[in-house]
């Protein structure tokens, strides 16, 4: 291992600069045809950091990333951290109006955008005059994406900028634990909100704390990060980098000397398995059934085409996964760990469920809570194990500072209980007799029908086991008698007749209480989700109300 100065803080840039020289010749990132060794990545990070400094970017300034997956996403993030600036994740599917909100809310002064997303950026109603600079990037693999290209006056070519910039390391006084890490939420139930973290807290709560596989425990001192460099580990997250699920794990790999494979463009199950084969992937992370089911079907159709013997774990994060899919993954990939993670942009990683060969799989994930995770009842007292009562999941310890520009939402989410500050994300759960936490779903989506509570995710996971259902979202619709009733918005399996409401009710009767069964069915061509597979309940509500 090369001799480098150990980091003095848990600052992301400090740790990056200490780690990369020790693994300079290793591959760090792969995204379709793009590859970067650690040395190549460091060179380009320095070049972009020098360019940003030359146009006045410094501590606290925001750098917007309107990008699909791309190795340059990480280049830009690390360059911003180097200057104590703040990278801002922006959904490349957003309209001009939505991007305008993010630009205004974050205060971004520089924006990086893929060519095929320029039309959306150019259509921001307020215009782009307040930006210092727009940099345009070509798509990593144009064959996997589509989008309208627009002219943005004064925009620069990212690669030309790097070629003309210095590769010399950038020294930024004052870097430390309090520098900002910002993660905008997906905004599936409202406007996206920026979650503001101290980098030290984000390192432990989100990025693994020097233990990317979460097997041996976090480090205690910054210099110990050099002892956690892994040997030849390959990680493959299928979520886009604009979401926490991929961003956190990719950063944890970069700080451990591992290799991360990224999927360019839209999900292509055949390309995913080919990448697992070619790069000898060790851990593959999916995002719920929306991503996992197409992968399983493609593998089943081509059982001898790819070699997945390098896998030792298939994990899930960012969206619920059905029991039947967990079981099928365990059958197809015998001996591999099936891990279901639980957390959010506001809470960090809260827990996980690691399925063993003989574990029974039922309902939503049941996980062993971390030391700071509690389920509180309506009186803000911990729910007693085995009581059968439900409550709100909360966690304490390393938490964000709050939401950017939103003190009211901050006060409603981060609440002091008995002298400790807790994050309440809205997830509901019960506490089993053995102390494990059984998730029920998001309270914000809970349907109150005749005084009974129905959690959509529980019904969705059961409906996904119906052979005629490809995807589904469940919402409440107005009902004169019951206040609300349950509606299922269903995308049928291709080539099959759409299931009827009676079909779905019969399928669920043995699994769920009668009041949880859908009373309305809306069949759609496609269920709308985010690029990471997250549910768009606003769209589903409108689809159900308009039926």
Image (cartoon, rainbow, N blue to C red):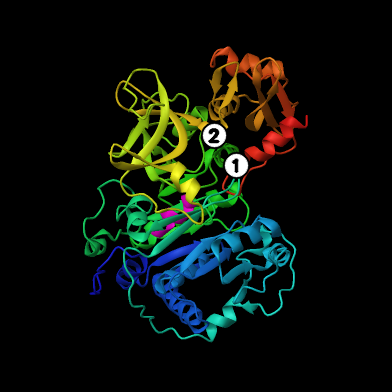
Q: Is residue 43 magenta?
A: no
Q: Residues within 10 Å of mark 2 (few under 14, many from 20)?
A: few
| Residue 168 location, quadrant | bottom left
**Outermost residue, right side:** 547
Q: Earlier in the sequence, mark 1 or mark 2?
A: 1
Q: Is residue 249 magenta?
A: yes
Magenta-colored span:
244-251
User: Where is residue 365 shown, x and y percent of the image?
Assistant: 43, 31
- Residue placed most toward the observer, 136 or 467: 136
Answer whether labels 1 and 2 touch (C-beta < 8 Å): yes
Q: Residue at x 70, y 69 (%)?
A: 127
- Image-based side of 298 in relation to 370, left or right: right
Magenta portion: prevailing SS class: helix
50 versus 518 height, above or below: below
Look at the numbered disc 1 and give the secondary structure of its residue.
loop
User: Where is residue 524 shown, x and y percent of the image?
Assistant: 74, 34
- Image-based side of 258 in relation to 462, left or right: left
Query: Can residue 527 be seen from the camera position used here?
Result: no
Look at the numbered disc 2 and give the secondary structure of its residue.
helix
Q: Residues within 10 Å of mark 1 (few under 14, many from 20)?
A: few
Q: Which residue is mark 2?
A: 444
C-alpha separation, residue under disc 1 versus residue under disc 2: 9 Å
398 versus 475 height, above or below: below
192 versus 90 height, above or below: above
Q: Residue at x 55, y 56 (%)?
A: 263
Q: Which residue is mark 1?
A: 189
- Residue placed most toward the observer, 428 or 302: 428
Query: Can residue 106 be seen from the camera position used here?
Result: yes
Q: Residue at x 35, y 50 (%)?
A: 205
User: Where is residue 162 shown, x and y percent of the image?
Assistant: 53, 81
Quadrant for the C terminus in the image? top right
């Amino acid at each position: 291992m090369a001799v480098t100065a150990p980091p003095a803080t848990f600052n992301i840039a400090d740790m990056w600069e200490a780690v990369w020289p020790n693994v300079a010749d290793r591959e760090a990132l792969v995204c379709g045809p793009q590859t970067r060794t650690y040395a190549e990545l460091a060179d380009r990070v320095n070049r972009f950091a020098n360019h940003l400094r030359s146009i006045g970017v410094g501590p606290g300034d925001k750098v917007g990333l309107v990008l699909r997956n791309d190795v340059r996403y990480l280049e830009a993030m690390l360059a911003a951290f180097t200057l104590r600036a703040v990278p801002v994740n922006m959904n490349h599917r957003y309209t001009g109006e939505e991007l305008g909100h993010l630009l205004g809310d974050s205060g971004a002064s520089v924006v990086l955008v893929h060519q095929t997303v320029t039309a959306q950026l150019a259509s921001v109603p307020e215009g782009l005059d307040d930006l210092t600079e727009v940099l345009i990037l070509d798509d990593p693999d144009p064959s996997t994406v589509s989008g309208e290209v627009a002219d943005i006056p004064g925009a620069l070519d990212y690669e030309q900028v790097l070629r003309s910039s210095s590769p010399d390391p950038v020294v930024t006084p004052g870097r430390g634990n309090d520098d900002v890490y910002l993660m905008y939420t997906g905004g599936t139930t409202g406007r996206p909100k920026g979650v503001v973290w101290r980098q030290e807290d984000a390192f432990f709560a989100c990025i693994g704390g020097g233990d990317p596989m979460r097997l041996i425990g976090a480090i205690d001192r910054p210099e110990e990060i050099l002892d956690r460099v892994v040997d030849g580990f390959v990680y493959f997250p299928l979520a886009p980098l604009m979401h926490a699920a991929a961003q956190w794990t990719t950063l944890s790999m970069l700080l451990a000397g591992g290799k991360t494979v990224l999927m360019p463009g839209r999900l292509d199950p055949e390309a995913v398995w080919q990448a697992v084969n070619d790069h000898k992937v060790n851990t593959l992370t999916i995002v719920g059934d929306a991503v996992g089911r197409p992968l399983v079907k493609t593998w089943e159709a081509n059982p001898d085409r790819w070699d997945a013997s390098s896998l030792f774990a298939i994990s899930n994060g960012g969206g619920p996964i059905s029991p039947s899919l967990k079981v099928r993954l365990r059958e197809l990939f015998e001996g591999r760990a099936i891990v279901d993670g639980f957390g959010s942009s506001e809470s960090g990683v809260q827990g996980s469920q690691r399925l063993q060969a003989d574990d029974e799989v039922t309902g939503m994930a049941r996980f062993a809570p971390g030391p700071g995770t509690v389920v509180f009842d309506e009186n803000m007292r911990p729910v007693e194990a085995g009581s059968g009562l439900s409550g709100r999941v909360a966690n304490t310890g390393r938490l964000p500072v709050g939401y950017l520009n939103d003190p009211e939402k901050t006060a409603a989410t981060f609440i002091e209980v008995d002298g400790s500050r807790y994050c309440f994300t809205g997830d509901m759960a019960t506490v089993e007799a053995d102390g494990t936490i059984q998730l029920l779903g998001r309270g914000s989506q809970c349907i109150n029908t005749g005084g009974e509570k129905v959690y959509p995710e529980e019904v969705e996971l059961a409906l996904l086991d119906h052979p005629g259902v490809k995807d589904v979202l469940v919402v409440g619709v107005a009902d004169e008698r019951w206040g609300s009733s349950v509606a299922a918005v269903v995308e049928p399996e291709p080539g099959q007749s759409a299931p009827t409401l009676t079909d779905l009710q019969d399928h669920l009767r043995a699994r769920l209480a009668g009041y949880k069964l859908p009373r309305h069915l809306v069949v759609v061509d496609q269920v709308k989700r985010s690029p990471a597979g997250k549910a768009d309940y606003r769209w589903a509500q409108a689809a159900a109300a308009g039926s």
